[in-house]
Image (cartoon, grey):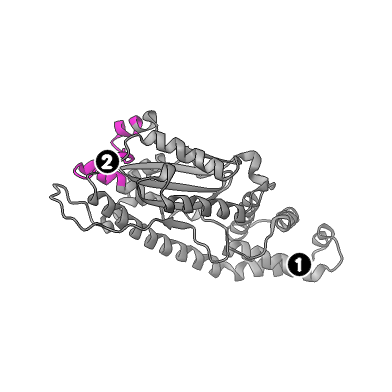
Amino acid sequence: MLSFDLSNQAAILSAIHHFIELSLNFDISDWELMTYLQQLTPAFKAFDQDEIQYSASIQTFINIIQWIDDGRGECALVDYLDLHSLNQINEIRRTLVKHRPFILAEIRQFRDQERDNQKLFLQQVKTIIYDHYQVLIVRVDLGYLKASMPIITIKDFYTHISSLIKLMKDKNGCFKHLLGYGLALEQGVTKGYHGHLLLIYNGSKHAQDWDIGDKVTKKWESITHHVGYGRHSNTKEIKDNYDRQGILGIGMIKREHPSQVHNALKVAQYLVEPEKYGQMLLVKPLGRRSFFKGIYKPHGRQYQIKFVPPPIDTLYVLTGNQNDTAWLNKLLLSDQ
């Protein structure tokens, strides 16, 4: 019945999230309910950690298994669940329904937060572009090798991310002449914990974006002690394909080229997407965020620019267009 890999923390949490959604939105049988609990409970406990915060769906599951543990005493989990009466099963279903408002509230909060993050990041990207004659934009996806996922917990992921952010702040090596960045952390069913990184360099200092992309992916692999991997979109083949479709928004972007600027802003926009609730991290270390951006101080010089970019709110309208969303998806490697 379960199609998920239960060998790693990220996959187990995705399976639990799926179970909670399935239970709340579909009429699953008592047998299915018990089978999910029998399989997911020991898997979850094997990877549970202190000092972390779970999403509302995972917290719902935790409350259910705590209620079961309080009632079963020394009885084995499988035996106890097999002996569950109709009243006890109904109590589990009531607990699920009782937590529905918390899950819906979390979805609304996630969308509101992502909209705020998106607006602030777009404003920063737009400022950087118009402060410089040309910028070099590099798009990198960061993840972990399939074989290494069983040993990677959310704390490991954030340790690696913290090391990466420190290097970006120091602006040395492959991050020299970095003007700004955006980093969105997500979770996929098969990809596990992963991040989408947008890097903006001074285009007067760098010209070979594919080389930077290669170096950044190697830096991530080094940070993770080679259990992680990185892929970037700045190869000639990928960019030529985007260019033919008129959607190229990475590589060298010149502020006086309207289509380049427009496409670059749309790439930045999709990095933080309010509708990507399905890729939301289901667990985080206490007090940590899932989106990071660099600090950029505008230099304040004025330029005669032929093209005035659309307001940030106008770009929001574009996300509602199905065609716009379709090509934006092509700029991301599979999130799943």
**Residue at the location (87% across, 66% down)?**
74
Q: Nearer the viewer, residue 50 or 334?
A: 50
Residue 138 in view, yes or no:
yes
Q: Nearer the viewer, residue 287 or 85?
A: 287
Residue for badge 2: 204
**Residue at the location (34% across, 60% down)?**
120
Q: Which callout, 1 or 2, points at the residue further toward the start of the chain?
A: 1
Residue for badge 1: 68
Under mark 1, the amino acid is Ile
| Residue 248 included in the magenta stretch of the image | yes
- Image side of residue 20 versus residue 91, left or right: left
Residue 30 in view, yes or no:
no
Callouts 1 and 2 close, C-beta under 8 Å: no
**Residue at the location (83% across, 62% down)?**
80
Q: Which mark is residue 185?
A: none
Callout 1 environment at 10 Å: few (<14), some (14 to 19), or many (20+)?
Answer: some
Q: Residue furthest right?
A: 74
301 vs 5: above or below: below
Under mark 2, the amino acid is Ser
Task: Classify mark 1: helix, strand or loop.
Answer: helix
Instruction: Between label 1 and label 2, give the one nearer the viewer.
Output: 2
- Image side of residue 297 versus residue 218, left or right: left
| Residue 24 included in the magenta stretch of the image | no
The CA distance from mark 1 to mark 2 is 62 Å
**Residue 312 image position (x, y, % from top left):** 27, 57
Q: Which span is picked out in magenta?
A: 240-264
- Image side of residue 134 versus residue 219, left or right: left
Task: Classify mark 2: helix, strand or loop.
Answer: loop
Q: Nearer the viewer, residue 232 or 212?
A: 212
